[in-house]
Amino acid sequence: MSTDDEKPTTFHMTPDDFRSQGREVIEWIARYMETVDEYPVLSRVAPGDIRSRLPDHAPEHGEEFSAMLRDVDDILMPGITHWQSPGFFAYFPSNNSGPSILGELLSAGLGVQGMLWSTSPACTELETHVLDWLVEMLGLPERFRSQGDGGGVLQDTASNSTLCALLAARERAMDFSSGRTGVAGDLTVYASDQAHSSIDKAVRIAGLGSDRLRKIAVDATYALRPDALAEALKRDREAGYRPCLVMATVGTTSSNAIDPIAPIAEICRREGVWLHVDAAMSGTAALCPEFRWIQRGVEGADSYTFNPHKWMFTNFDCNAFWVADRSVLIRTLSVLPEYLRNAASESGAVLDYRDWHVQLGRRFRALKLWFVIRHYGVEGLRHHVREHIRLAQEFAQWVQASDGFELAAPAPLNLVCLRHVDGDSRTQTILDQINAEGESYLTHTRLDGRLTLRVSIGQRATQRIHVERLWQRLSALGGIDPNSSHPVPGGDGERG
Ligand code: PLP
């Protein structure tokens, strides 16, 4: 035993210091929430600027916490692109919220590693429970609930969920887990030519070969054409391939196109092919019954994924993934070394989420999601989703009514794609200027080869005034009368 004179050396932060410095951090975050609209949305640093301000070597001696927080302000903040700014209209929302941040903090405080039910039963059971809640909240099929053969799991990203869906579909076709060997070289995968690049990556990782991914043609709304899918499947069967998985997208990245799940599911059922649905951002819209048309036919899906970390006020990372038959997924990903054996797992009465994804370890993500759902309630979440969609629809009407811009694609939900009628060069100049000014941040895509601006509305703090301001600047740069087809910012909100 050590005496008072021989106190053990410790470098740890004491609980008292944690308390006072933790208060400072919470205060810092609260102030950031209040002032985030004062920063230029897109960071203006040049490559290497941030590193050039960091010391070459790690400190030999521990430093004061206040110095770290000061460096966050002085060194890091100039290199932050403000995803939480109300003027962030780029890519897709990646919004957060107070309850989510606090849930994240609590999860870090508990420091749970929930690879097995027994390594923290609450981590597993809360996750299973919240994912069952979400099935009901989103109007997803009962077969995804854990009470039956299905179930949900939280992953880091939609990319990994899509990979897991493909690995499970490959397992169903190849039966690798029972010791069979062989190459999956005759397996083929199908998605629209607008599908997210994560399917390309998954096909590569799964070892199928990039040329086994069939990019299916889309219709005028950029949605997958079921007739083209049926034709591709037929062609491949005749050529001796084995169709393995079809991915339908609810809300494509470029233009928010909604693939028609019902006819796609019917084709998959007929062909015995795994149907995976990627609803990364747009799945959140299904919280509102009036937008559930986007997933009509989802009862026929084998797996489904969406990202609460995009549009559901849950900070990155938090992806939800469901399967209709969990036994295939578990068979695909379960490897059991001696050191993980335990009585609970062997009883068969528990879920061990380590068997539901690629990695072993996992953090307590369900906590922040639980906090978000309990804080907002379904009513609150619906309210904000409806508001974002309403703003996007209004913005789309301004575009349509203007004589300088045109809609580049239908805007079913919260993403509006537009371009200047003078063509790519003018559109590019407008994009560059908007982003240089710093009040808003937009990104682009190409649709039918033409440069297209994407206005993605879904950040927590975005209100009508921010959308109006963006339209004012677009109008001015596009050479159209800013008051002819849209409201004046700060006015009564009526369209002229
Ligand atoms: N699928 C779609 C339709 C997306 O828009 C995105 C994000 O851009 C992804 C998948 C990838 O999401 P994650 O970053 O969670 O892998």
Image: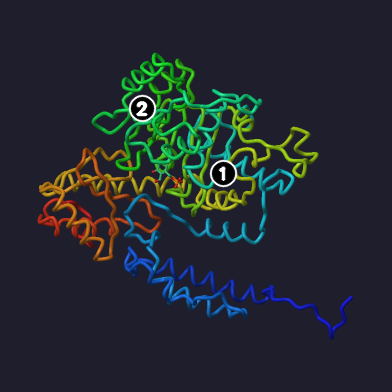
Q: Earlier in the sequence, mark 1 or mark 2?
A: 1
Q: Would residue 381 appear left or right of 146 to someone viewing this image?
A: left
How far apart, in angstroms, are the residues tagged by discs 1 and 2? 26 Å
Instruction: Residue 273 in the image: state x and y as whole percent.
Output: 47, 22
Q: Would residue 280 appear left or right of 401 to someone viewing this image?
A: right
Disc number for residue 26: none
Q: Would residue 349 appear left or right of 49 to someone viewing this image?
A: right
Disc number for residue 154: 1
Toward the bottom, the furthest residue is 5
* CA neighbours of label 1 inside 10 A, class few (<14), some (14 to 19), many (20+): many
**Ligand 1 quadrant?**
top left
Instruction: Residue 24 in the image: state x and y as whole percent.
Output: 55, 74
Residue where numbered disc 2 is placed: 260
* CA neighbours of label 2 inside 10 A, class few (<14), some (14 to 19), many (20+): many
Q: Residue at x 81, y 81 (%)?
A: 7
Q: Residue at x 24, y 66 (%)?
A: 437
Q: Residue at x 17, y 57 (%)?
A: 429
**Image quadrant assignment for residue 442:** bottom left
Instruction: Residue 100 in the image: state x and y as whole percent.
Output: 53, 56
